[in-house]
Amino acid sequence: MIKVLVSGACGRMGQAVVKAVMEDQELQLVAAVDIKTGIDAGEMVGMGKSGIIVTDNLDQAIEDTKPEVMVDFTRPDVVYGNAVKALKKGVSPVIGTTGLSDESKAELAQLAKDNNAPCFIAPNFAIGAVLMMLMAKQAAKYMPEVEIIELHHDKKLDAPSGTALQTAAMISEVRAAHQQGNPEESEKVQGARGANVDGMHIHSVRLPGYVAHQEVIFGGLGQTLTIRHDSLNRESFMPGVCLACKKVRSLSGLVIGLDKVMD
């Protein structure tokens, strides 16, 4: 049994993680941390009384329960500090919060190495989303003109999404950077063409009703190719989260992307 602490346990993703960990026979929920306190984690997710009471003291929770893994789905401005605390205590973070800077990632990589505690970050834990990114990378070898549209719920804090940026990074590995569209085009409204990454455009949609969705659209002579993934509920991420919890301790340093732990 792998001992797991869930940080951000009372959030929408956090509750889904708590339930998934409690249902997995290879994982053991030992602690739940959130700014909301005094709640029984099991009762919170409809699993019955667990005896695990949500606390807001991450350091104390780690000291008391000795988890091997900390799953963190908090906020971009909180997750880095949580990961630092975990790594310094030899606990491996499994991070689903996006928005970490390259500088923060580099610091976490060094801490993971110094404390012999692997750290794992995934822009998206949905296995289908990982397959979408891998397929997009393959397609870009043959159809290099591409744009990305990502659609998320209106409570998401960062844009573009981590999945869109990771997709663009993977495409850039096989596609020479170049500016797409008419070289003389102009935006009548600033931002109309979206973000520009190596000449690719990324468009972010934020509306209620969405969970997490992405289209990668390729254009060629007389044809288009669209690769799309839709997460219809937060349970779609849970098999990937549980997989990462089981694999993270066998990794080394900082590892980014669920594809790195998929067989």
Image (cartoon, rainbow, N blue to C red):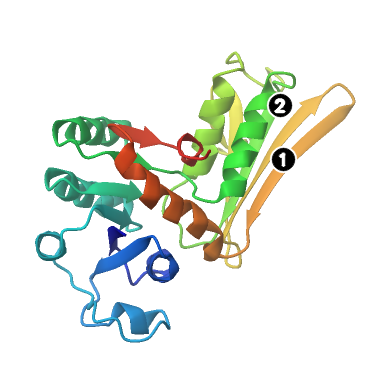
Name the side, left or right, on which 169 lies relative to 87. right
Task: Indicate the secondary structure of the residue bearing disc 2.
Answer: helix
Q: Look at the numbered discs 2 and 1 and tell me whether their residues touch, using CB distance below 8 Å.
A: yes
Report the front residue among 28 and 257. 28
Task: Choose between 261 and 172: the one closer to the eye.
Answer: 261
Residue 252 drawn at (x, y percent): 29, 32
Q: Quadrant of residue 201?
A: top right
Q: Which residue is drawn at 37% across and 42% down?
A: 121
- Circle 2 residues within 10 Å: few <14, some 14–19, many ≥20: some
- Lateral position of residue 219 relative to residue 141, left or right: right
Q: In the displayed structure, would residue 62 be above or below residue 162? A: below
User: Residue 124: in sight, yes or no?
Assistant: yes
Measure the C-alpha gap from mark 2 to mark 1. Answer: 9 Å
Q: What element carries label 1?
A: strand
Quick one: label 2 or label 1, which is nearer the N terminus? 2
Q: Residue 174 sits in which quadrant? A: top right
Q: Where is residue 16 in the image (x, y as percent from the top left)?
A: 44, 68
Q: Which amino acid does label 1 sit on?
A: Ile
* Residue 192 at least partly seen: no
**Residue annotated with mark 1:** 227
Q: Whole-percent x and y of residue 263?
A: 53, 38
| Mark 2, residue position | 139
Q: For this rendering, which residue is in front, 247 or 206?
A: 247
Q: Would residue 22 appear left or right of 240 to someone viewing this image?
A: left
- Please, is residue 202 above or below residue 236 in the view? above
Q: Where is residue 145 in the image (x, y as percent from the top left)?
A: 71, 23
